[in-house]
Image (cartoon, grey):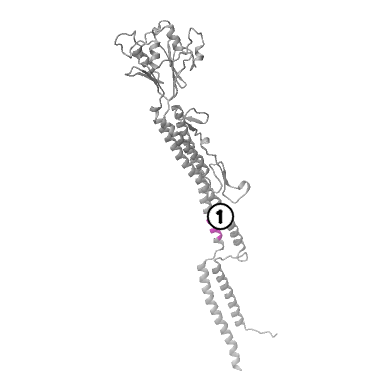
Amino acid sequence: MATVSLSAGVRSALTALNSTKADAAQSQYRLATGKKVNSAVDNPVNFFTAAGLNDRAGQLTNLLDGISNGIQTITAASKGIDSITKLVQSLQSTVKQAQNDAAANRPKIAGTTDLSGNSATLPVNASKRDIALNKNVFEAAVGAGAVVASADDPATAGTNEATNGNLGAAVAQNELQIKAGSTTFKVTLSATATVRDVVNTINSSGIATASVGDDGKLSISGTGSDALSVELGATTAGAFAGSAAETAKLIGGTTTNVQSAGSSSVRSTLVKQFNDLRDQIDGLARDSGFNGINLLGGDKLSITFNEKTGSNKNKLDIQGETVTSANLGITTAVDGSATTGQFNVQNDADLAKAADSLTNVLTSLRATSSSLGSQLSTVQTRQDFTKDLVNTLTQGADNLTLADTNEEGAKLLALQTRQQLSQTALSLSNQADQAVLRLF
């Protein structure tokens, strides 16, 4: 094959044209990809640095999904605590309603006999409230066979106290004992005591009140809902004008303690209402999970914040707690005698304890809510930080690799102009060579 020699002008024009085409192609490629560094050939340092930044940004972006799920899990538990708090407040309202029904729940021992009916030996026109107090009259006032003496009958020497079901320590001679729950009031009566004296003394006890109605009957009512009992001790010779026969009758064989306990139908109807609300607390806590994790069911939530491992790994572990009505200390309401884990809705003392317990439950729930709120704030802060860090890493990588489209566009336009001029120069060079042909 023959070798074709080109003139210096043509060769220079071709070289310039090829260079311009290569530069134009590079600008077109940068405009198409948006990057000025598309491979390690373009700029090894920038390429691998940008790749490392983009890789870390990608890992953090993947962690954002876990952080987002963690936020929703904590939020679900927090919403559950808020709803449980409302249920506990409803329980408080139920207890308060039961406490407000106290007037209908007071134990009462009512007399069955008009005091004046036993006053044959009393002065004419004596007041029912001022008559001398003898055992016959007192027994008649509260009902025959209804009052028991805890002190022993002298005739039987120590047997009647056990037989009659003593409520506590033995009642001394001439002593009246009233007992409400675990509180006992004792008073020693004088031989000249009147019914008015007894009424005033009982009213000063703080655990019971007494009165004699217009019908002449003595009534004793408890100031609380605890079972109320009344006992009268044996009397000394001559006291209250009593005889040995009357004493034997008062404390004899089959006599039982006078006891009365309060009972309110309103309170009875509140038992189911209270227990239904209590059950809802358990159900609500079980439903407060998200994506299979329930912080109110004792589950553990682990949220990872960075892409590192080992000791450099940054994460937050949140240990949930099992929230149930029993664990919160909310006992079951019962209408009557209560056992462990229950409270008697008819008993004022039990209701007071239940009210105090619910107040403590609210305090505990607020503490749990505060803890969840603090943890939620921490996770949200890390989420915002991670998003900002991803943007920073991505922007840093882009600064190393992205092309300036305005610059590349202007460069491409200049190269196209230069390419046209190179083509014109090549044409002129060819025309100079063709001028030699004209000589022939």
- Secondary structure character of the magenta stretch overall: helix
Between 21 and 422, the one lying in front of the other is 21
**Residue 108 covered by magenta stretch:** no
Residue 279 in view (yes/no): yes
Residue 134 lies, with reference to residue 300, above or below; the image says above
Residue 390 lies, with reference to residue 73, above or below; the image says below
The crowd level at tag 1 (other Cα within 10 Å; few <14, some 14-19, many 20+) is some
Residue 88 lies, with reference to residue 142, above or below; the image says below
User: Which residue is depicted at the point 58% across and 60% down?
Assistant: 50
* Quarter-of-image position of residue 140: top left
Between 242 and 200, the one lying in front of the other is 242
On-image quarter of the C terminus: bottom right
Q: Residue furthest right?
A: 1
Hey, what amino acid is under mark 1?
A: Thr
Residue 162 lies, with reference to residue 395, above or below; the image says above
Between 97 and 144, the one lying in front of the other is 144
Helix, strand or loop for disc 1: helix
x, y percent for residue 373: 49, 43
x, y percent for residue 13: 59, 80
* Quarter-of-image position of residue 355: top left
x, y percent for residue 216: 34, 17
Q: Residue furthest top?
A: 237
User: Which residue is depicted at the point 58% across and 75% down?
Assistant: 21
Q: Which residues are magenta?
A: 388-397
x, y percent for residue 240: 39, 8
Q: Which residue is mark 1?
A: 61
On-image quarter of the N terminus: bottom right
**Residue 389 covered by magenta stretch:** yes
Q: How many marks?
A: 1
